[in-house]
Image (cartoon, helix red, strand yellow):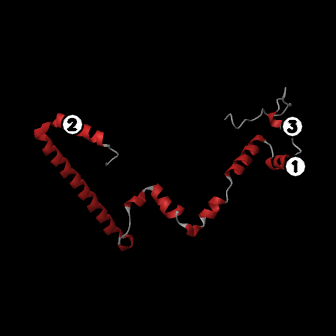
Amino acid sequence: MFFDIGPMEMIALVILAVLVFGPDKLPKVIQDTMSFIRKVRAFSDSAKEDIRKELGPEFKDFEFEDLNPKTYIRKNILENEELGLQDLRNGFDFRKEMAEVTDAVNGTDTTAAAAAGAAGAATSTPDRLRKRETLDKDEPPPFDSDAT
């Protein structure tokens, strides 16, 4: 139905309204509520028309839903292919970028490890996975990006 209210909820609301207001006052409450809703709609429509009138003729097709930032971005940036953003968005490999950042933090090199792994030279456990008994004198403790 409307406002995501199902038929059982609507029946429960009607029964609750009859119990709270009584059958004799319920029509008057419904009438007052409907008149209030009409006044609010008329007020908002007149406010929209006043704003459109003040903005001028170039904003005649202005929609107030465009003021929502998500709607504005979706309509003007994501769907607008004049900027070529689709090619730019498809050009990024986020997994590769994140691997490079992680390796930069850990102090390892992905390109060398990838080349060695592709050649079949690296069959043993990588250095950062091996446990060492002690650290060197000026060596900082290892950084685990998964633990942070």
Q: Is residue 74 left or right of residue 39?
A: right
Cα–Cα span, label 2 and label 1: 76 Å
Earlier residue among tags 3 and 1: 1
SS at mark 3 in the image: loop
Relative to residue 25, is residue 119 depicted above or below? below
| Residue at image point 87% right, 46% down | 120
Residue at (69%, 49%) from the top-left corner? Answer: 95
The quadrant in which the C terminus is found is top right
**Residue 23: x, y in percent?**
12, 38
Q: Are marks 2 and 1 in contact (CB under 8 Å)?
A: no
Residue at position x 43%, y 56% in the image: 68
Callout 2: helix, strand or loop?
Answer: helix
Left or right: 101 in relation to 39:
right
Q: Nearer the viewer, residue 129 or 16?
A: 16
The residue at 69%/36% (across/down) is 146
**Mark nearer the N terminus (2 vs 3):** 2
Dot 1 falls on a residue whose secondary structure is helix
Instruction: Decide if residue 29 is on the left or right side of residue 147.
Output: left
Query: Is label 2 or label 3 in front?
Result: 2
2 in relation to 88, above or below = above
Q: Return the residue at label 2.
A: 15
Looking at the image, the residue that sits furthest to the top is 133
- Say which amino acid is labelled 3: Ser
Q: Amino acid at mark 2?
A: Ile
Q: Which mark is residue 119?
A: 1
